[in-house]
Image (cartoon, helix red, strand yellow):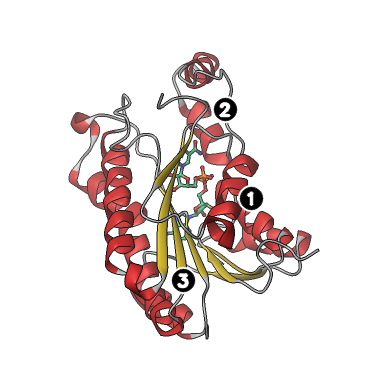
Amino acid sequence: MSKRLENKKIVVTAAGQGIGRATAIAFNNEGANVYATDINEDTLKKLNKEHPNIKVKKLDSTNKIAVKDFSESLDTVDVLFNAVGFVHHGTILDCEEKDWDFSFNVNIKSMYFMTKFIIPKMIKQNKGNIINISSIASSLRGLPNRFVYGTTKAAIIGFTKSIASDFIKNNIRCNAIAPGTVHTPSWEERVKAAKDPIQAKKDFIARQPMRRLGTPKEVADLAVYLASDESDFITGVTHAIDGGMSI
Ligand SMILES: NC(=O)c1ccc[n+]([C@@H]2O[C@H](COP(=O)([O-])OP(=O)(O)OC[C@H]3O[C@@H](n4cnc5c(N)ncnc54)[C@H](O)[C@@H]3O)[C@@H](O)[C@H]2O)c1
């Protein structure tokens, strides 16, 4: 039986840990040729050791020249999975200009560079597929202490719709995924950094009506569907996967 992503060449960003890593593995398991990128070389090496079929490349997605060079090293790309993101904790009062600039750089400019340099290949192929990681904390829901994070994640929804609209004629699809809280290494760090970590953990779980966190694998399974031809009639849509947070 053929696998769901057989022969697809897929670039994954933020593949060193969490959702990006789980998605790179799920894509590989479904037969894709995966190019896993991340700024962290150590986590990439670990990924490659455990999954030797996955090609890894250290890449800072906010570095324009590095992204351009990387995209030029690839002949074709069928799917681009943009997962780079950083959570700044706080309201507008806690968000200095440097925090604003950092979050916009990491969360959205990285996506702009990756897409800008890879989409010409998709136009040439007259086929392509881009999947962007947004969040429930975005234009979908306002959550406390997620001011600049939610603002950037809302921008990703607009970005996704614009790309979907502009390139539908080129047979290029673009969708977003909006997870609720997912159990990843950075989530564990956020809990540890809280004033009262035990209460913080309880609060994270309590805000999800299913009373549990999502797993990176659950998000990866949705990404496999969106990357596959099974979802060929879907574009410009933000897909919530959030344990009921957005009901
Ligand atoms: N974990 C959650 O609860 C949750 C919920 C909603 C959305 N998201 C989003 O999902 C995405 C992944 O989050 P996660 O929690 O799985 O991952 P994470 O925060 O645990 O890991 C992020 C990865 O991104 C890499 N990275 C950071 N800056 C980079 C850069 N400039 N270039 C390349 N790589 C870089 C890091 O090295 C790391 O491997 C993010 O966009 C995040 O905002 C996460």
Among numbered discs 1 and 3, the one appearing first in the sequence? 1
Residue 38 vs residue 78, the one in the foreground: 78
Q: Is residue 185 left or right of residue 137?
A: right
Give the labeled residue for mark 1.
Answer: 22
Q: Is residue 205 above or below residue 162?
A: above
Q: Residue at x 41, y 54 (%)?
A: 175
Q: Quadrant of residue 113?
A: bottom left
> Residue at position x 53%, y 15% from top?
202
Mark 3 and mark 2 in contact? Answer it, CB < 8 Å: no
In x, y percent, where is residue 9? Answer: 59, 73
The secondary structure type at the circle numbered 2 is: loop
**Residue that numbered label 3 is attached to:** 128
Q: Which mark is residue 213?
A: 2
Residue 28 placement, left or right of 195: right
- Is 39 drawn above or below residue 177 in the view shown? below
Can you see residue 175? yes
Q: Amino acid at mark 1?
A: Ala
**Residue type pointed to by label 2:** Leu
Answer with left or right where residue 79 lies relative to residue 103. Answer: right
Return the residue nearer the eye: 241 or 152: 241
Q: CA distance from mark 3 to mark 2?
A: 32 Å
Q: Is the residue marked by circle 1 packed among few (<14), some (14-19), or many (20+) residues within 10 Å?
A: many
Specify whether tag 2 is near ligand 1 (CB below 8 Å).
Answer: yes
Q: Nearer the viewer, residue 44 or 11?
A: 11
72 lies left or right of 215? left
Is the CB–ligand 1 distance for label 1 below 8 Å?
Answer: yes
- The span from disc 1 to disc 3 (Cα, nearest Å) is 22 Å
Q: Nearer the viewer, mark 1 or mark 3?
A: 3
| Quadrant of the rendered image containing residue 5 | bottom right
Residue sitting at the far right: 1
Amino acid type for the residue under numbered disc 3: Gly
Q: Looking at the rendering, which quadrant does residue 235 occupy?
A: bottom left
